[in-house]
Image (cartoon, grey):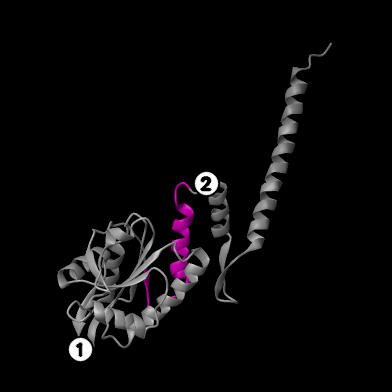
Amino acid sequence: MLDEAAALRISQSAVGRTLPDFGFRDSRHKAVRLADFRGKPLVVNFVYTACYHTCPLVVQTLARAVGMAQDALGADSFNVITIGFDARADTPSRMRAYAQQQGIDLPNWRFLSADAATIDALAAEIGFVFYPSTRGFDHLAQTTVVDPEGVIYRQIYGSDFGPQALVEPLKMMALGQSGSLVSVAGIVERVRLFCTVYDPNSERYRFDYSIFVGAIIGAASLAGVGIIVFRAWRRQKFAGRVQPR
């Protein structure tokens, strides 16, 4: 039986850990390594292809969130991998068929397979707990966000999470990337990201002009106050230098 409280503790203890460079095969039998995804945030999702209840729901929920994140942040701004953790059954061919069954055809999303030793080692490092059961496997519905350096940044739980749970950590990493203020294009991109917010009415992310306008008004107000204070200081300083006759 899966002890969810213990599984959550194990999962959370993995946050901040740097993932080793494990090797996989993608759905076309091509060799893939975790190091291949360094330089961009990486979203990691685990499934077993024989699952007919939780895993498909997680994948569909993730697909909606990934599509929204790609719209908001750019299709090439992060990568996604779905790993089959039933090593005996989740072959590259099965993973390819599974992706087709789930209708997944989004950029930079790959479905991967590995041997049992690699799956067990990766699960231990990433904090993913699973056990064989009468239904196949019991496991946490867990999605992991890894930063561009390969460090586990956030764990997302549940089979039906809101898209903000994925988009916001990706957005925070994009805003925090070093070197993004060295050019006009970098500054514009940071402003765009900062002002891109979730609209619950449309259930989409959009650029909120009010935040941009408010920031400009706030900056102008601060500049005006600064000018007034500076002029008052200048007058006081000048008056102090005038000697009475």
Left or right of 189 on screen, residue 108: left
The answer, for residue 48, to whether it is visible in the render is no
Residue, far left: 117
- Distance, label 2 to label 1, CA atoms, is 54 Å
For the residue labelled by badge 2, is the local secondary structure a helix, a strand or a loop?
loop
- The disc placed on residue 181 is 2
Q: Residue at x 42, y 74 (%)?
A: 106
Residue at 63% across, 59% down:
211
Badge 1 is on which residue?
A: 134
Foreground residue, 26 or 211? 26
Q: Which residues are magenta?
A: 156-179
Q: In which quadrant is the C terminus drawn?
A: top right
Which quarter shows the N terminus? bottom left
Q: In terms of image quadrants, where is residue 157? A: bottom left
Q: Residue furthest right?
A: 245
Residue 130 position in % (x across, y down) = 23, 76
* Image spot of residue 154 (x, y percent): 37, 63
Q: Residue at x 26, y 82 (%)?
A: 94
Residue drawn at the location 44% of the way across and 69% of the way down: 165
- Give the percent coordinates (x, y) of residue 126: 27, 65
